[in-house]
Image: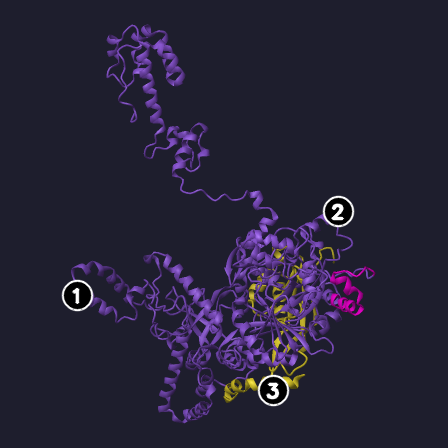
Chain colours: A yellow, B purple
Amino acid sequence: MTEPRSPGMSSIQTAPVHADSTPPAVEMDPVEYTLRKRLPRKLPKRRNDVYVNMKTDFRAQLARCQKLLEGGGHREICVHGLGLAINRAINIALQLQASSQGALQLAANTSTVELVDDLEPEDPDEAGEPMTRTRNNSAIHIKVFYPDPQGP
Amino acid sequence: MRNQPASVQYPSSLLNAESSPKNGGDTPVTGVHEGPSDVHPFTARPKNPHQRGGWVRGHQKDGGGYAKEMSKYITAGPFARARAAEVSTMLKAVTKTTGSCHVFGALPKHMRRRAMSHNTKRLPRRLRDAANRMAGSKKKKEQAKSKSRKARRRHGNLLLEFNRRQRKNVWLETHIWHAKRFHMVKKWGYCLGDRPTYKCYRPSYRAMSSHCLLQDLSYYCCIELQGEEDKLLASLSQLCSKEAGPTFAAAVCLSGRRQGSVVVYRAGLYPSQPLGPVTFLWRPRTQGSAHRQLWIWAHPNMKQDLLPELQAVCQCCEAVVPPVLPVVTPAEVVPTVEPEPKPEKTAEAKQVTGTKRKRTFKDAGGPPAKKILGDGTRSPTTSVTWKSSSNGIVINDLTMEIVRYRLIGPQSHSVLAETMEPATDCDVRIMPSSLWWPEHCKNQSKMNLHREQADVFHILKGLYSTGELPSGTVLGLTVDDPRLTLPTKKVKALPCVKQVDEEKTRELMLRGVPEHCCQSYLWEQSVRDNVTENKISEQELNRMRSEVLVPGSRLSPTPLQGRVPVLLVHQPGKQLGHEMSSWGAGWDLLLPKGWGMAFWVPLVYRGVHIGGLNMSLKHSQNKGAPHFPHDYPDCPAGVRFQEEQETQLLDKFKRRPPAKRTNYIKHGCLAPFCCPWQQLAEEWELISRQGGEERKGDQTQTTAEADALMTSHGDIPVTKPPSRVTVLRNRKSLRVLSGWCRPTTSKGQRRCRVGEVPPLDRLALTSFLTAHGMSLVWVRLSILSKGKPELHAMVCAPTAEDLKLLKKESFSGPQEPTHKDHFKSRIRRRKKAPKKAATSSLCRDKAEGKESELPSSPSHLVVGLWPDPLPSVTAHCSRVTLGWVTQGDFSLSAGCGEALGFVSVAGLLNTLLNQPMEHRGMLLLRDPTSLHYRFAKINIEV
């Protein structure tokens, strides 16, 4: 299929191609793919789920958790962090515990999240199959809760 | 008292008793009055002499004077004559109208009502006649008597009226729904909803980012190309270039699994003369056939440019007369499918002949008017199909043949999954029918395909967000009539993430929809027409519903007509840049014509928000993508739009009193309504060339190489800077430029792969500018502090001092000194001139001579605007202008003011080169109505 198509294409494109490919500064590396990361898979969110990110201010996220625990009337909240945000999620959980004078307890779980990347070829006519790549990233889910009073 | 007859003479003595029967009969008022005085003429007199005034009123200065002259008897004849004369003059006076005397003047104030003079029915009945008489003389012209409301609202007449009203601007199928809720605008030959009449800016944004926003995009034009794959590709490859991204030949799109998008240029003229962006969709291959079908979707504003271009590259000049369509509807179904609406249009003009023709045309007495489906403005003789004799390509204009709805938002797939159900298959034993679905049910392979498609559709329900799918995925489907499952109340569609099948979901996310599932019968015109013709009317459906035993339950055997082939096309969300990736992703729903409302209402019942043109602008703004035709200043459609916008804004500006207008001259804003891109690019081209020549003197060594480069380019004629301004769309160059714009020492830098982009220096700049000197580049600017950029805000380059001050926390941005308005005094002088003209014509001649030196003749001066030949746009203000903003607003997604616009490549690179590393990419933004510059960060997203 590709053979008869190419002469038609190239004959038209010779002139403009020449204009841009000659400047040496515009050369790219030979592996011509553009990487596009897709968003991590989301799951339905309850009201007491907090997904931690690196963009929002730390204090704002901490305040949000505190609000949920104190004003929101939730007995427990879940703090989720993925990748780089794991550190921050742990920080938030520990801060919550410290500020509650030991009333809160933590239960941490780790998991692995599969992420999808799209690889878009620079020359889309050549690649037959759209390239996708999966990679794994670590995630943490920390349950911050008031222990049951009748438990112990 | 004015009309009191002066000639009435009273005889010397009067006898009341004789006159009373006559007087009483004529005018009861006086009769009653006289009554008591008749009985006791003499006894009453001494007691109350003034009572006699009832019939002698106005005659005597003193009432007592009568007593002496009063005789004991009166003669009947003269008395009666006198009374008669009095009465007749009174009657005459009453009938005569004078001046502004209104009838309701006779009424006491508390009985007068508003608009009595306009509407006589507001008067008491006894005055109505007089009022009518008065009004009759005044009424200018009789209003043409319109039919009664009942007659007008009768279905056939209503349709005739609707068809008449959409002769100039076509209505979409959802027009009436929209017209009740939206501010409608007439644009591009359509009547389109601009924005809802209720306040919903933020809810609509929220719907886009967390649930679903619905838009009717049926006004987009679909052009179908059919032919051999190689020939199609060879023709179409002239229209676009690989450098600007995937073309029509991109392998993924060519297989029919993905929708592609491309910017189309005039044949072989890339990179100059673009036409505009189109999306395209290939029909999946059928086994053993090289014959392909391609749909190109274009904005109606660019269709007039695109269609001739397509005809030229495909050598399709041979117009096919409409009835002889290459794919004809199955003849026995409904023989009068296509030509049906066409006689209707003539019928509107001459109804009598139209109905006659109809009667001969159609034996059964159908409704007198038929709703126009599809394009109503197209004259029946205009051809919609063009054929090429040399390469066999057929171009088919499918405008308004396919309904296109866009659902934006992460939950759009759940809305779709809830609204539509895969078609239930029907009994195969049914006799051959004219409907398409029973015929399909007999074919086992077709049913297998349908089952597979239905499976994929079920997996779709298991997704949480629309953005999880590969962008541009296509899914063909056949669904049941969604009106059958219409909920009784509006519900909000929510995702149900059941554990459908983890493996299958994963497969769908990674690979997308398998190729054979992208096939849909929507591609076939015969099926489309069949479905459109056999749609159950709303009335019929309601009747069937009313006959259901349990009210509100579903019609148990689904009516055979209720199977519709649809195409679902995934729309990628934000793909450029790193932030907010895949925001605003969604699905497009393609339907056969006629089914618009049948799908629209069920979709609305799933709790979606509806957006108009305004929201699609905001959608692309939040995506950071240029919106057609606003942000394509190098396309003919974009140029047309800019001119339109300029006249609109100028008219709005001129409507204000001159003293209340913004004085743009004082604000140092040269072009508040229309951006002179060409002038900007030319000026920057000149500046950069001069800069290069200056530097040649002092640093010969470095420029020698650049010189060599330039001369090497000089040999090739194509590299000469094109005379017309273009927008840079070369992906490689954009990527390089994007790398140069980023500061090298910043948090954001971590992401970009270092080493890919060559360092920005004089040499690289020169070589880059040789190729793209006259180009503009699409940029996104986010404001660092507060401030909301507006339309046509100026993008300027900060000076070195500004950047130094930027480190200070309190510094919000430099100020522009107020400019002086020289034109104002001239306008004032011009106003005074005519006064002087009478006295000294010589003086005026002198003044005119002076004014002729000015850039424009004084007659075109508008207070507060620069007259036409603008001075240098780059160096007009204290900061150098690089470009202008075409879309600017407070961005709800970023939480700060964001602007999208174009800057000159030459200007941008020269600015970047002079900026210190840590402040690279920092620009200034200034609104046309403000003197305050704000710092903004530039982003070029590829």
Q: Position of residue B361 (x, y in %)?
A: 65, 56
Q: Nearer the viewer, residue B141 or B200?
A: B141
**Magenta region, residue range:** B429-454
Q: Amino acid at mark 3?
A: Pro
Q: Amino acid at mark 1?
A: Leu
Q: Amino acid at mark 2?
A: Glu
Chain letter of the residue beneath label 2 in the structure image: B
Residue B386 showing in the rendered view: yes
To which quarter of the image does residue B522 belong?
Answer: bottom right
Looking at the rendered structure, whether the residues under marks 1 and 2 are on a common chain is answered as yes
Q: Which residue position is annotated with label 3?
A: A7
Query: Vertical placement of B97 versus B424: above or below?
Result: above
Precedes in sequence: disc 1 or disc 2: 2
Q: Which residue position is annotated with label 2?
A: B547
Q: Which residue position is annotated with label 1?
A: B842
Q: Nearer the viewer, residue B448 or B872?
A: B448
**How crowded is the residue under tag 1: few (<14 C-alpha within 10 Å), some, or many (20+)?**
few
Q: Position of residue A95 (x, y in %)?
A: 60, 65
Horizontally, residue B832 falls left or right of residue B265, namely: left
